[in-house]
Amino acid sequence: MIYAFPPNYREVNIDFQKRFEEIVDKRTKIFYYNEENKEYRNVANFIDDGHLNKNGAKIFTSELIEYLKHN
C-alpha cells in the first residue's frame, strides 16, 4: 500500500502528516510531493486551495510515477 499526499496551495500541515505516519502500518509507504518544486506554489496550477487543475495534476502525476517506478 502506498499513500500519496498531493500538493495544495496552503501550508503543509506537519502535525497532520506526523499523526498520519503514527497510525499507518509501518510497512506502508508514503509519498510526499516535492515541496521544493516551485510549480506547487504557482496559483495557476490550482483550481482552488486544495485541488490541482489539469496542468498541476500532470506535474504531480509525473512526480508520482517516478516514485512508483523506484519503489
Image (cartoon, rainbow, N blue to C red):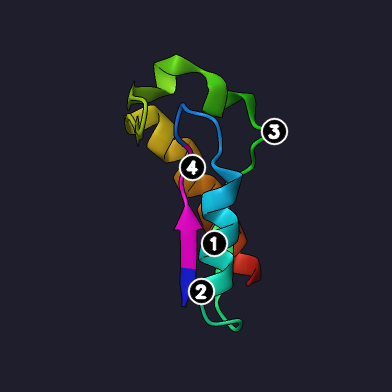
From the viewer's perspective, tell me whether residue 9 is left or right of residue 19: left
Going by the numbered disc 2, the residue's amino acid type is: Ile
- Amino acid type, residue under disc 1 in the picture: Arg
**Secondary structure of the residue carrying numbered label 1:** helix
35 relative position to 68: left or right: right
Q: Which residue is denoted by mark 4 in the rendering? A: 60
Q: Is residue 48 above or below residue 33?
A: above
Q: Give yes or no for contact between labels 2 and 1 (Cβ–Cβ under 8 Å).
A: yes
Of label 3 and label 2, which has the lower sequence position?
Answer: 2
Q: Which residue is mark 1?
A: 19
Q: Secondary structure at mark 3?
A: loop
Mark before the other along the chain sequence, 4 or 1: 1
Sequence-wise, which precedes: disc 3 or disc 4?
A: 3
In-front residue for pair 69/4:
4
Magenta stretch in the rendered image: 3-7
Q: Residues within 10 Å of mark 2 (few under 14, many from 20)?
A: few
Mark 4 vs mark 1, foreground winner is: 1
Distance CA(mark 4)–CA(mark 1): 23 Å
Query: Is label 3 in contact with label 2 (beta carbons under 8 Å)?
Result: no
Tell me if mark 3 has few (under 14), some (14-19) or many (20+) residues whose alpha carbon lies within 10 angstroms of its own.
Answer: few
Measured in 3D between alpha carbons, the distance from the residue under mark 1 to the one under mark 3, in whole angstroms, is 22 Å
> Mark 2 highlights which residue?
23
